[in-house]
Image: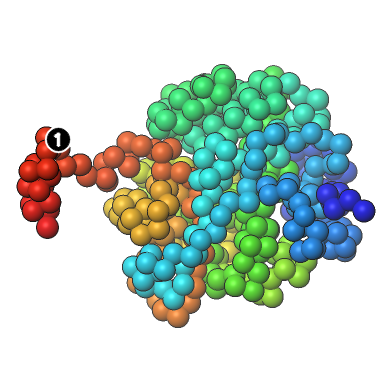
């Protein structure tokens, strides 16, 4: 018998009114509209559990397509050839001591093909675009979803149109230009780039890779949670810390963790520590508000460009995920994020971009506030590689020792730096 696994998708359902749709080319609920009527993919978990077992998984490809039962991609669909997911988890005892937690595990998602977590979603988006017969895809992005979609599109020969805000870091823009994307740098914020992209996909009939409206993409994001469950099992820490911009990532991770709990891979669910920048706290504010009040637009500014979002598109899913987990939100200053850019690579060997290490700054804050107890363990998801925003990294890194090529010169340097 084949161990490859077949998708057990049964359909889509609106998260507001519950209306069901076949798992085809639909984005949002007709009845509830594109702003609220976000759809969710449904599966037959009983059927999935029959073949999605540790024994079968041990024989499968080491990327995120190993979870085909709970992915919305049929057996005949060609997936992009780039290897996405199955990123390493490593114990980080020195960073644990620095942050004051009993145990710290780091999951390095900067190891994905275009160097961020976003490849998980883009790979599913591109597979769906190909399945539905599109030759062009589009997205709006603070940078990483953009370079990720451009890279995945390049790997299968799709055209990509990418809308980025004016302040997207140059390395990310260079990356997507090199992948052959048409880059539309909007004079405005990410939020304005997003609105323009939504209008453009509707006007030109491009496939829409925006996680907030495309339920299939969240299925890609959840694979980080599936992997945490499989890689750590009973050793999964008490908390999982994730940085939050729009909120799709943390909602996806939670969905993956819940599925691994349903499928019996983990005995209990962790609590989520959602980390936002103090200068971009919209989702955290919604979490603290009573009930689910309408989102108030809030000007966003932070060094962590990937989580700089004034109008989060998926705050409801993120807030619900964090509540359901018994977790909480913390906000961290840019100073704390810059600190984490320095101590994380020094204490772990893993180099993350600002939004990538924000989770660690969040753990420090949560320990200080007593949210995480000293005896508790934490997994930090590092969502993007440090080379993604090399300017910020350089501003933290300091300067090397300049010297003449002689032993005497070296000795002088060593003596001075004792
Ligand atoms: C997109 C992104 C995030 C946050 O994801 P959201 O879905 O916007 O909450 C965090 N870190 C990095 C590196 C990202 O690219």
Q: Nearer the viewer, residue 300 or 337?
A: 337
Residue 62 place in picture, x, y as percent: 68, 49
Image quarter of residue 268? bottom right
- Check the image and tell me how it is coloured: rainbow
Q: Nearer the viewer, residue 30 or 211?
A: 211
User: Given the current orientation, which residue lies at the most extreme bottom position?
Assistant: 375
Q: Nearer the viewer, residue 253 or 5?
A: 5
In this figure, what is the number of numbered marks?
A: 1
Residue 351 place in picture, x, y as percent: 41, 48
Image quarter of residue 78? top right
Dot 1 falls on a residue whose secondary structure is loop
**Relative to 20, 266 lies left or right:** left
What residue is disc 1 on? Answer: 405
The reply to whether residue 122 is in sight is yes
User: Given the current orientation, which residue lies at the most extreme front position?
Assistant: 407
Query: Is residue 120 positioned above or below 337 on the image?
Result: above
Image quarter of residue 205? top right
Residue 298 place in picture, x, y as percent: 43, 46
- Residue drawn at x 76%, y 24% is 134
Instruction: State yes or no: Cβ of the residue under disc 1 lies below 8 Å from any atom of ligand 1.
Output: no
**Relative to 292, 19 lies left or right:** right
The local crowd at label 1, few if under 14, some if 14 to 19, many if 20 or more residues have their Cα within 10 Å, is few
Query: Is residue 114 positioned above or below 255 on the image?
Result: above
Q: Nearer the viewer, residue 101 or 32?
A: 101
- Residue drawn at x 62%, y 66% is 232
**Image quarter of the C terminus:** bottom left
**Relative to 198, 378 lies left or right:** left
- Residue drawn at x 32%, y 36% is 391
Residue 294 place in picture, x, y as percent: 56, 52
The reply to whether residue 285 is in sight is no
- Residue drawn at x 45%, y 25% is 174
Query: Is residue 66 positioned above or below 392 on the image?
Result: below
């Amino acid at each position: 018998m084949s161990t490859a696994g077949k998708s057990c998708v049964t359909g889509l359902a609106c998260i507001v009114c519950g209306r069901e749709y076949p798992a085809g080319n639909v984005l949002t609920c007709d009845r509830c509209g594109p702003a609220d009527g976000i759809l969710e993919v449904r599966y037959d978990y009983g059927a999935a559990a029959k073949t999605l077992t540790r024994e079968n998984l041990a024989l499968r490809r080491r990327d995120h397509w190993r979870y085909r039962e709970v992915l919305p991609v049929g057996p005949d669909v060609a997936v992009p050839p780039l290897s996405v997911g199955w990123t390493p988890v490593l114990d980080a005892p020195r960073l644990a001591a620095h942050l004051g937690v009993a145990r710290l595990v780091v999951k390095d998602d900067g190891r994905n093909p275009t160097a961020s977590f976003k490849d998980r979603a883009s790979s599913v988006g591109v597979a769906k675009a190909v399945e539905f017969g599109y030759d062009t895809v589009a997205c709006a992005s603070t940078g990483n979803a953009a370079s990720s979609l451009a890279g995945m599109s390049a790997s299968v020969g799709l055209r990509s149109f990418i809308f980025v805000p004016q302040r997207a870091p140059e390395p990310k823009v260079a990356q997507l230009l090199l992948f052959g994307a048409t880059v539309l740098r909007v004079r405005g914020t990410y939020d304005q780039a997003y609105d323009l992209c939504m209008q453009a996909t509707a006007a030109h009939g491009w496939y829409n890779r925006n996680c907030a409206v495309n339920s299939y993409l969240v299925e890609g994001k959840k694979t980080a949670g599936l992997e945490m469950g499989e890689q750590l099992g009973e050793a999964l820490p008490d908390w999982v810390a994730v940085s939050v911009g729009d909120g799709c990532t943390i909602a996806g991770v939670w969905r993956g963790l819940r599925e691994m709990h349903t499928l019996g891979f983990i005995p209990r669910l962790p609590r989520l520590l959602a980390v936002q920048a103090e200068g971009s706290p919209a989702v955290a504010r919604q979490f603290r508000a009573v009930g689910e009040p309408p989102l108030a637009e809030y000007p966003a500014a932070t060094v962590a460009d990937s989580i700089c979002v004034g109008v989060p598109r998926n705050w409801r899913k993120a807030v619900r995920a964090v509540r359901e987990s018994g977790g909480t939100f913390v906000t961290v200053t840019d100073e704390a994020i810059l600190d984490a850019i320095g101590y994380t690579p020094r204490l772990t060997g893993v180099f993350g971009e600002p939004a990538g290490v924000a989770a660690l700054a969040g753990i420090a804050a949560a320990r200080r506030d007593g949210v995480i107890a000293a005896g508790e363990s934490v997994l930090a998801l590092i969502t993007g590689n440090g080379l993604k925003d090399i300017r910020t990294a350089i501003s933290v890194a300091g300067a090397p020792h300049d010297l003449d090529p002689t032993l005497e010169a070296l000795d002088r340097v060593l003596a001075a730096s004792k």
